[in-house]
Amino acid sequence: MARTRPRDRGRSRAKGEAHSAAAQLTLADWEQAQARSAKPIPDSPTPARATLEAEGSEALDRLAEMLAPRLADELSVRMRAPAGEQAATACLLTLDELVGELPPGKRPQTWKRWLYERTRRGEVPGCVKLGGMLFFEREPALAWVRAGAASTR
C-alpha cells in the first residue's frame, strides 16, 4: 500500500474545498431564485373567487343555524350537571365547618388537631377522606357532636 506524503494530502483537500465552495449557494443566490419563481398575488378577488366566498358564507350561516339549537341543548344539560354535584356534596361538612359546630372554649387549631386524632382512631362517624382532605357527612357528624363528643377525651 502506497503512503501519501503530508503535502499531497493537503493538495487533494484544497481541490475538494475549492470544488465544494463553487457549488455552494449563497444567500444572495437563494434570494434571486426565490424572486424569479415568485408569482404575483392579485390584489382584487376574481369573480369566481367572490362567488365561492359568498357561497361559503351562506353555507356557514346555514350550518350555524342548524347547530345552534343542538349547542343550546347540550349547554343546558351541562349547566344543570354542576348543580346536581353541589347537591351531592352539600351534605358534607368541611373540617372548618365541623370545627365551627364545636364549643368556642378552645382555639380552632386545637379542635382541628383533636378531630384529626379522632378520625385516625375511627371515632368520628361519617368521616370521608377526599383528595387528602377530610369531609364529614352532615347528619352523623353533627349528631356525634351534639351527643357530647367534645366532652370525651
Image (cartoon, helix red, strand yellow):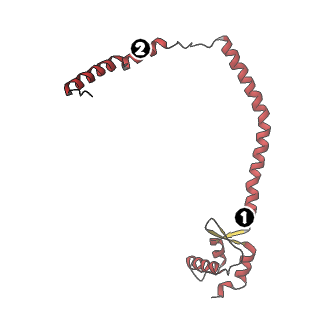
**In front of the other: label 1 or label 2?**
2
x and y percentages locating residue 126 in the rendered image:
72, 75
Q: Amino acid at mark 2?
A: Gln
Q: CA distance from mark 1 to mark 2?
A: 70 Å
Image quadrant for the N terminus?
Answer: top left
Rendered image quadrant of residue 32? top left
Q: Which quadrant of the structure image shows residue 99?
A: bottom right
Give neighbour class at mark 1: few <14, some 14-19, many 20+ (Cα, 10 Å).
few
The image quarter containing residue 14 is top left
Q: Nearer the viewer, residue 19 or 89?
A: 19
Residue 130 position (above or below residue 29): below
Q: Amino acid at mark 1?
A: Thr
Q: Residue at x 76, y 40 (%)?
A: 71
> For the view shown, which residue lies furthest in the front direction?
1
Question: Which numbered marker is on residue 49?
Answer: none
Label 2: element kind: helix
Percent across and percent down for residue 119 are 64, 78
Q: Measured along the vertical axis of the image, is residue 121 above or below residue 39?
A: below
Which residue is at a point 62% across and 71% down the rendered structure image?
96
Q: Is residue 126 left or right of residue 30?
A: right
Which residue lies under the disc numbered 2? Answer: 32
Q: Position of residue 152 (x, y in %)?
A: 65, 88
Q: Look at the numbered disc 1 and give the secondary structure of its residue.
A: helix
* Residue 130 image point, x, y percent: 65, 66
> Circle 1 sits on which residue?
89
Q: Which badge, 1 or 2, is on the more N-terminal residue?
A: 2
* Left or right position of 44 against 61: left
Disc 2 residue crowd, few under 14, some 14–19, many 20+, Cα 10 Å: few
Q: Residue at x 19, y 25 (%)?
A: 7
Left or right: 146, with 22 as reference point: right
Image height check: is 85 above or below 127?
above
Q: Residue at x 74, y 50 (%)?
A: 79
